[in-house]
Image (cartoon, grey):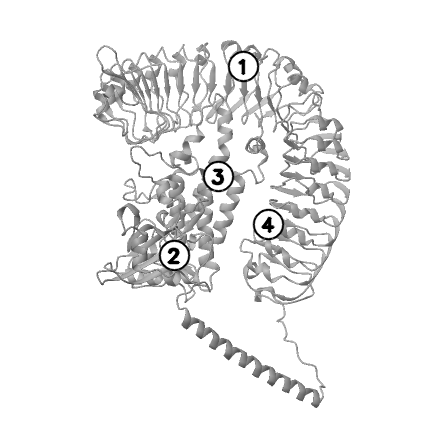
Amino acid sequence: MGAWNSTLHFCQWYGVRCGRKHQRVTIVNLSSLELSGSISPYVGNLSFLKKLFLYNNSFNGEIPTEIGHLRRLQNLYLHNNSIGGRIPASISNCSNLGYFTSYNNNLVGRIPARIGSLLKLKAIAVAGNHLTGDLPPSLGNLSSLQEINVQENNFHVSFPDALCKLMNLRILDLSINQFLGTIPPSFLNLSLIEVIDISINSLEGSLPLNLGNSFPNLQFFSIVGNHFSGSIPMSISNASSLELFQLNENNFTGRVPSLQKLHRLMRLTIAGNNLGSGKADDLEFLSTLSNATNLQALIINENNFGGKLPEQLCSFSEKLQMIFIDENQIFGNIPTRNCVSLEILVANDNYLSGPIPSSIGKLINLGILYLKHNDLSGSIPSTIGNMTSLLQMDLSHNKLQGMIPPSLGNCKKLIRLDLSYNNLSGPMPPQLFGSSPLSIGLDLSRNQLSGSIPSEIGNLTNMGRLYLSKNVLSGVIPKDLSSCTSLEYLYMDANLFQGSVPSSLSSLRGLRELNLSHNLLSGNIPEFLEEFHTLKLLDLSYNNFEGTIPLEGVFKNVTAISIEGNKNLCGGIPELGLPPCKLQQPKRGLTITLKIIISTVSVVTGATVLLICLLMRLSRKRKRDQSSSSFHGKELLKLSYQNLLKATNGFSSDNLIGTGSFGSVYKGILDPEGTIVAVKVFNLMCRGAIKSFVAECEALRNLRHRNLVKILTTCSGVNYQGDDFKALVYEFMVNGSLDSWLHPALGSDEVPRTLDILQRLNIGIDVACALEYLHLHCETPVVHSDLKPSNVLLDENMTGRLSDFGLVKFLSDGILGNSTDQSSSFGLRGTIGYCPPEYGVGSKTSTSGDIFSFGILLLEMFSGKRPTDEMFKENLSLHNFVKRALPEQVTEIIDPNLFQARFSVHHNDNLRNRRNDMFIECLISIFKIGLSCSAESPQERMNISDIVAQLSSIKNKFLGAQLPREREVADAFLLAGGQS
């Protein structure tokens, strides 16, 4: 807070308000300023303070006990920070306190019993912490209390009786804890209650019969994920203010009662129970929703409901957006009348029959259509092409026949299409591959499709999965398939494809599974498959392949490949049991004349080749003598000490970018082009600096990759004092280092720079790609040995570039993986916190050491904490800190700059949480990769190819390009751009 200084009276400081009469501070509002540090105990000196707002920052430390000195305090808002420790008992001295919020922090321990003395308290919200124990019985004294929110803590006790005394309570949220037992009858005394959320606990028993009569003001009732049983009380219809009624994931049985009076109902969720009996009258309760004109979601899946859906289902409410009826015993036809607002229809695993009605084309807002595992018949109506909002469609496991309608090509937003396990016939329509992205995948397997694969398939450059198995497709594998470079799963087995595998498919380097079995393919097995580092399953069985089986890559794993049924294969790894490949023998019976001719030609040819080689060698030697400092055939800039002195303005501190172990880096401007460069000047007085200079020259002379910082030239000479001078000149990275973005050192007037999740994920992939190149694709494997955020630089496109090769190691001895069995006399290599533990006990440098450093880097990028943070003492490390939090407490360890967006203000908590589920799931996956990479044992660490593949998969998933689970189709829809 640079604006807080003596030049202004403190009453004029930003965020401070004083009383008019005595000029004493009455309000401090520092919310949402990205502040950090601890809350000063001197806040207790502001004896006239009434309101303290510190929410939406990065404060840590504990709530100071001096807060109890603030006898006039009315509002204390501390939510969305990183505050730890206990709630101080001294808070009970704040006798005028009316509102206390500290949700989404790191509070531990119990809620102090003395809080029951705050008789003016109206709201307490401490959700999203690590509080334990029970809710103190003294809470029952707070007769003014209107809101209690202790969601997502670790309370593990019976349902608190004290709550039943709070007659003015409007909002009660005990969700995501471990509350036990039954709801006491006295709970029905809370006649003013409007919101009850006790979801995800271990509560049991039945709901009180007069539940609906006791809560006339009830608007939100959610008991999701408990062990409640019995029937739904008939009185629920009398809770006429009810808007959200959620009973899913319990053990309710019997019939659903009439809901006739719930005319304000917006969401009915009773999925995952044992409701219904499979009889025809199970769905009669749906007709009682005729007055629910605001109904938006009907979620009754995973029950035992029988019967037919009423044809007028959507006539009840023109606002109906979601229908989930999957995993029941519902039969009859699909109702589509008046469902114009419908966005999601999931009806898998039922007994729906008859044709798909042509009127389905009127559902122009439908984004998700899942009808798999039913008895639908007839053809797919061409009107389905009118559903231009369609994102995902699954009609698999039915009895559909006829041709795939070309009109599906009009569904330009379609990212997933599954028509498998039907009786569809005819060719694959080229229109299907026109403009639909199909980024998740296309499954047409188990049909009777014929003809060849249209060349238009090359348009699907973002397609992740293609399943064409068990059809009667023929022709050759089209070269256009090589444009589908995002493919991970390709199944073309059990068809009539012939010819060889085109060499252009070498572009499909992201493949994980490839199945070409049971076709008529011939020729050699492509050698480029050896280079597919992510390929884990390869099935080429029952074709006409011949020749040598490759030895590298997937071919080294006998359990990952299948090649039986090909009669003329040889070689391969011994486990395959195939005969060795024979060298081709010359034919007998050549005439003496022919032998003389062949011998003469061979001698002349050999002499010619030898002469050419000698001439080329002499030519190369002359070129080396003429230019001894060229890298990769390019003439380097020739810069002297004087040139660099001028470029950096005398190595001015104003141009200093950073310092390292062996020198300093300056920003420079070269004449006459005005090219901006980075100049690394080595401090040759430091031990190891010359060795570092030579190592960087050697490394950068041999290495070229888009994710490595490019060297422009070197300078080796003397300065004006006659001392040795050595420097390297690099491309200038305009966005500085990753470290400066993760841990900015801000001045008073600077706006902090932040990276969002996608930028961090992209940078992580960039660094992983750089390591993959160094470890696997260089002529000699290279170990970086000093991977950390300050050595990752960001160019103008925020692409990550790995720099600083001063500790690089060329593994000429072939050490690629772990090296715990090899000793070394070298000292510690790398930087403390990022250096693998085996280096500390003398193990040789290995690629697994880089993997460890990358894991720590990844954990730091998404937690915002350095491995050398003061909090990591004794047995607590960054690795263990993250490991202990996964997966349930991942939100506690996320970098606040990422975390803040998850808790954006929204009146509907469930919608807000749903939109953040994918965000959290991706972060958990990233942290798991970081933990696996930073395992103590080198043998337990991931390999770099798997790291690149998994991070890329997470990125695709975050962008909505991975197959969603059935229970999460609504989340996938929202991420893909649906409205709610």
- Callout 1: helix, strand or loop? loop
- Callout 4: helix, strand or loop? loop
- Say whether disc 4 or disc 1 marks the residue closer to the N-terminus: 1
Q: Quadrant of the C terminus?
A: top right
Q: Amino acid at mark 4?
A: Thr
Q: Is residue 929 visible?
A: yes
Label annotation for residue 922: 3
- Callout 3: helix, strand or loop? helix
Q: Amino acid at mark 3?
A: Cys
How far is disc 4 from disc 3 in space, using C-alphas?
23 Å
Label annotation for residue 242: 1
How far is disc 4 from disc 2 in space, using C-alphas?
29 Å
Q: Is residue 231 visible?
A: no
Name the residue furthest bottom: 592
Label annotation for residue 147: none
Q: Does the residue at mark 4 contact the one at mark 2 (Cβ under 8 Å)?
A: no
Q: Amino acid at mark 1?
A: Leu
705 sits to left or right of 510: left
Residue 973, horizontal then vertical, whole percent:
58, 32
Q: Amino acid at mark 2?
A: His
Label annotation for residue 784: 2
